[in-house]
């Protein structure tokens, strides 16, 4: 049963959307375990939205502890077709200052051992990930950020690190030499799983610090991040409100058919348990 077409993932500092009216909790069961928290489903300007706090209420989960598969499967279960993901990040470029907003269009993966696919255990698939975010949704998000008065950088590379410790200075300087724009700990897995689930995905990266490469700035600390998060939270909510209202009703991007040519396993060879587990994801591509 479709409950919402648009989903929002709230990162560090954004644990609710105050603009959602009549919001109610929705506990969703998945074949991959429990999501980070109960989803909150409400209405914004007549539009049904499902909200999830990535780290759980009270920020209980480290980045490496997040059950990304359960989170994304939960959104799919609720009927979500587009996800706006908010993330606190550090800047790796001089021109991207704290309190700026970045709409990344690429990712670099520096995580270790995280599960970032629904597939395996009887089903193989390889989605295209050359362009890892939805260009149409990113454009809406960028327009909303600019309209909200935020200094907005469209495009750039989000380097996803393992954490939970922040970077060493050597790592930070290395990532700068690679041309990465911002650094965070969560969005790569979300983007991959959203693509496999045929959900449009875009990131709203809220800059809190200069990581530790900037010699004129103090190395990043939790205290500094929290201070900037509080300033960023109101901006993030204003951007999300505008973006949700501006998202068109239909989809014309390729995200909704990402699995069409991605499944490689012969349908007759898929174990019945795997078929049940992934019915929501691949069912429409399998013979009845």
Image: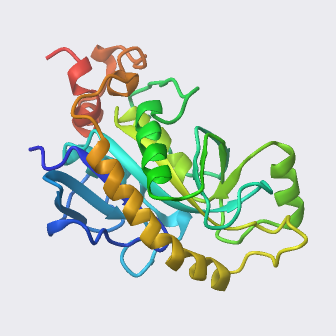
Q: Position of residue 260 (x, y in %)?
A: 35, 17
Image position, residue 195 (x, y; %) = 42, 34
Vertical arrangement, residue 249 with respect to residue 173, above or below: above
The quarter of the image holding the C terminus is top left
Please give the count of numbered marks on the rendered protein.
0
Q: Is residue 235 visible?
A: yes
Tell me: residue 204, above or below residue 247: below
Q: Quadrant of the N terminus?
A: top left
Q: Is residue 133 left or right of residue 1?
A: right
Q: Residue at x 75, y 66 (%)?
A: 210
Q: Pinpoint residue 177: horizontal percent, then vertical percent.
A: 87, 46
Horizontal side of 175 relative to 163 (left or right) equals: right
Residue 131: give x, y in percent of width and height.
Answer: 55, 28
Residue at 71% x, 59% y is: 91
Q: Given the current orientation, which residue lies at the most extreme bottom position?
A: 223
* Residue 117 visible at all: no
The residue sitting at 53% across, 51% down in the picture is 187
Q: Residue furthest left?
A: 1
The scheme the figure's colours follow is rainbow
In the image, 214 versus 264, the foreground residue is 214
Q: Is residue 65 above or below residue 262?
A: below
- Residue depicted at x 23% and y 36%: 280
């Amino acid at each position: 049963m479709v409950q919402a077409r648009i989903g929002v993932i709230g990162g560090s500092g954004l644990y609710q959307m105050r603009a959602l009216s009549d919001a109610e909790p929705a506990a969703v069961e998945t074949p991959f375990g429990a999501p980070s928290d109960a989803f909150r489903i409400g209405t914004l300007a007549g539009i049904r939205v499902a909200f999830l706090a990535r780290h759980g209420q009270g920020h209980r989960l480290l980045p490496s502890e997040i059950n990304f598969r359960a989170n994304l499967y939960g959104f799919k279960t609720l009927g979500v077709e587009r996800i706006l993901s908010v993330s606190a990040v550090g800047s790796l470029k001089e021109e991207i200052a704290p309190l700026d907003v970045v709409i990344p269009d690429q990712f670099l993966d520096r995580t270790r051992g995280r599960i970032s696919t629904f597939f395996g255990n009887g089903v193989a698939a390889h989605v295209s990930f050359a362009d890892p975010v939805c260009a149409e949704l990113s454009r809406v998000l960028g327009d909303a950020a600019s309209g909200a008065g935020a200094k907005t950088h469209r495009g750039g590379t989000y380097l996803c690190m393992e954490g939970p410790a922040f970077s060493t200075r050597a790592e930070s300087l290395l990532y700068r030499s690679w041309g990465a724009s911002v650094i965070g700990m969560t969005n790569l897995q979300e983007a991959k799983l959203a693509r496999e689930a045929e959900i449009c995905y875009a990131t709203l990266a809220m800059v809190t610090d200069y990581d530790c490469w900037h010699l004129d700035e103090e190395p990043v600390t939790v205290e500094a991040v929290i201070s900037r998060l509080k300033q960023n939270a109101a901006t993030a909510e204003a951007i999300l409100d505008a973006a949700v209202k501006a998202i068109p009703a239909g989809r014309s991007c390729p995200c909704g058919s990402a699995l069409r040519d991605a499944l490689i396993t012969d349908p007759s060879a898929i174990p019945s348990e795997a078929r049940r587990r992934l019915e929501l994801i691949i069912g429409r591509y399998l013979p009845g």
